[in-house]
Amino acid sequence: MAAHQNPTERAELAQALRTAVRGEADFGTTARALTTMDASNYRRVPLGVVSPRDADDVAAALAVCRAYGVPVVPRGGGTSIAGQATGTGVVLDLTRHLRRIVELDPASRTAVVQPGVILDDLRAAAAPHGLTFGPDPSTHSRCTLGGMIGNNSCGAHSVAWGTTADNTHALTVTRYGGDTLRLDRGTLPEALPGLPELIRTHLALLRTGFPELPRRISGYALDALLPERGTDPVRAFCGSEGTLGVVTEATVRLVEAPAARALAVLGYADEAAAAEAAPGLLPHHPLTVEGMAADLVREPAGLPRGGAWLFVETGGATPAEARAHAERVLRAADALDGTVVTDPAGQRALWRIREDAAGTATRMPDGTEAWPGWEDCAVPPARLGPYLRDFRALLAEHGLRGTPYGHFGDGCIHVRIDFDLLSPPGVARFRRFSEELADLVVAHGGSLSGEHGDGQARAELLPRMYGDELVALFSRFKDIWDPDGGMNPGILARPARLDENLRFEVLPRRPVDVAFGYPHDGGDFSAAVRRCVGVAKCRTARPAGTGVMCPSFRATGEEAHSTRGRARLLHEMLAGEAGEAGEAGEAGGAGGVITDGWRSTEVRDALDLCLSCKGCRSDCPVGVDMATYKAEFLHHHYRRRLRPAAHYSMGRLPLWLRLAAPFAPVLNTLARMRPLADLAKRLAGIAPQRTIPVLARQTFTRWLGRHRGKGTVIPSDDHVVTVWPDTFTNHFSPEVGRAAVRVLESAGRRTLLPGRGVCCGLTYVSTGQLDKARKVMRRTLDRLGSTLGAPLVVLEPSCAATLRTDLPELLPDDPRAAELAASVRTLAQYLEKYAPDWQPPRLNRPVTGQTHCHQHAVLGDAAERRLRERAGLTGELSGGCCGLAGNFGFERGHWDVSAACAEESLLPSVRASEPGTAFLADGFSCRTQLEQLGGVRARHLAELLAEGLDEDLMEGAGEVSGPVAE
């Protein structure tokens, strides 16, 4: 195929596509950079991205590409693990427009869908009818039906409902060049005249060349075209990885979803014992038989005794029936220990361990990187135990480590292995191990791929599984469908080598000079960016439970505004830097797509809508911390350059507020004068829709100094606690500080301030003014003096998170930073640990509101939940992000995204609240967003508790005579 790397040819191709399709044809730097990788080890740089609006657009785009001799790669969610969703030609993004469920027929239990339909959306549409789509990969919240068909995806429930091929009835497919075929079971399409002869002349080979096992995904399923197998071109097309054509519509089977489910969790001595037990459970007709070992489960809380576990899900018409089914499995299992979980929340928590494994397995317990490549081979279930023993032995022989887990009931194993893919010797070992493991899988009667397809990772090794003659038939089959070779070349037929196009080849060989310490990545920014392996949990349409990540993607739907998208752009930025320095080779025919390094406007624009919510730090299975990466980038991007106005106004807010405090009444009056307020907002880079917050007439620090001078009686002067006077509490919400003091005094504590002029540096960090942030942080450490290391109550979650994480990561060589970080407590955390006998007032009222995103991501809210329960506060707080997120929602140009984030769950929860509900938000940003967009006053938990204490005091005062001492 033609390379078309010449700028003139690329421009002509781009114009031809823009003329031919009604959707978007984007040949810009950002679009190309976002699609260089999927969730695999591979990287290929495309020429451009086309987002067709409908099937006619798909045909038109394919016709243009054929005319120009340019290859095409169909792409869904981009979560493929073997490299088949990357390519050097034109990427067809089928997720932007082709997302319609055309028809859902409960009577026939079928649905007609377009290829970009997200699996969870189909399941949600089918659920009211008691139906679901059986295959359910762990990426169900973001993978597409088209991608599932391309890879013949399976998921945890395949023991009950089979693979995607088992659940696909008919397909409409467009071939390279633009002609469209209808594929139905039982009939070969007339447009493929060479296909009947291919089958007829190779019957013996097709009947004997394919191993029989439930998870044979490798190669083309040519045996599905045998007459005794029903001559099924639909099944033969499934798993073709975009090499034959583009699915534009699919008719899929729906299955009855059990009304109730239970989970039997069985503990075994090791993974081999669990694997050997799995086949014996299949006669009990479970929905799933999933396995994992202790080296994957870092904190086995809630799991029964053992070194490995089977998760066996059962269904029933009622909860009692599902439980009885699970208990039968438990009795039949020869397990060390076991339990049955029926609580839906408990089941979800356990399944989350399994679903996040594709990400968590990318880090070994010691932090070493681990990679796919042998992610999902499968053997007959009866051979799984012996295979795992041999597999572990082969790992040890090569000095490698991995954490196997997966679909034990189907004999399919997932594993990430700590390959060294950065050095030539490491890559050579990767090849040797891959070749030997392929032989081992075949020796056990298995398939090189049991779920995710062969892609570039394994297709080169298919002759070891099928033999040269059958693999030659694969190439002929491909040629019948695609005689010009334009559909996803280098995959399955005539594949690229498994050690070509590795995505790490283009990265810098030496650590990049950065400001943060990146302690979990050896101080290497490239290693931090490599954390993103593309599993795309950040691309979900709804946050999982109380999760946060990624609010900007949910607001815009754009890949560039997802955590993964930003990580991809940073990867390409680093690749471009390395390419200029001559430190890296080329992958996929090109070096880094982004060539202007830290000055990149593409990276800047993508990071501009990052709310720095830190949700990815906790919700991303591999712990990508985009808020830190954004601060790092802004630090370099604006070094010795003029910054946006908001960086000077809101980025240096603590300074301006200290200067403004004596003039608060006058400034508040001026801010209410619209012309002056509009001028101030324009100069400060503030969104015109925003209202400037009111300054406190008396700061919290001034109030506390006077309060302590009143001689307040404290039961024990030995009980002293330091309260952090954060900028927001001090200058905007001193009532929060006063309430916290009231609560702490009721618990027998005397409150102190840590010193004059202390600051966590949050606003400097969030705007990337990291030199200034470090200066502020060092000054703070100097001023803490003897209070350093003592428990420190921080009322503002964002400031607490900054002290807990950003401070030690910006000052990694100062031991005082780690000491201060370890001392940080929220109010609830302090009371729970240091005043466990204190009883909160019983408030007995419902609450709604927002858990601060930094609290969720860094601090955790378990102590707050327990304190609310003890105080009789009922109801759940919203997940996600309020959308204000410090300076983000105030900055000009961010209003729409900020409001969209608030409308996701926070504002609807307020509107749905019952009378008498208290609105709770510990973060100043969350309270401000609720006031400005929701028209309600939210309060910090300390305020609700203090009000309850005062009410109790007033009630008590009515029962005694005489004056009450203050």
Image (cartoon, grey):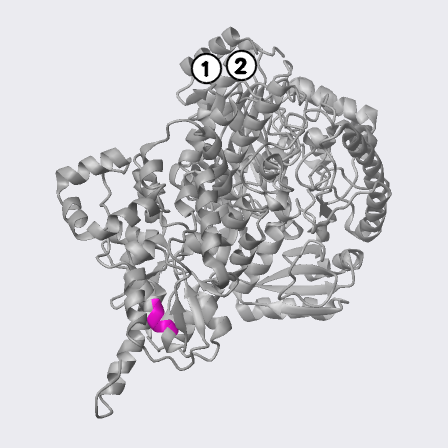
Numbered tag placed on residue 804 in the rendering: none
Question: Vertically, is 827 above or below 513?
Answer: below
- Residues packed near mark 2 inside 10 Å, few (<14), some (14 to 19) or many (20 plus): many
Q: Are marks 2 and 1 in contact (CB under 8 Å)?
A: yes
Which residue shows up at 40% across the image and 77% down it? 747
Label the magenta part by its dominant secondary structure.
helix
Residue 96 shows in this picture = no
What's the residue at 42%, 72% (across, down)?
869
The vertical placement of 162 against 754, above or below, is above
| SS type, badge 1 | helix
453 horizontally vs 175: left or right: right
Residue position for label 1: 17
Find residue 457 and report its horizontal and vertical position in percent: 71, 32
Q: Residue at x 46, y 51 (%)?
A: 802
Residue type beneath disc 1 = Leu
Q: Which residue is mark 2?
A: 65
Q: Amino acid at mark 2?
A: Cys
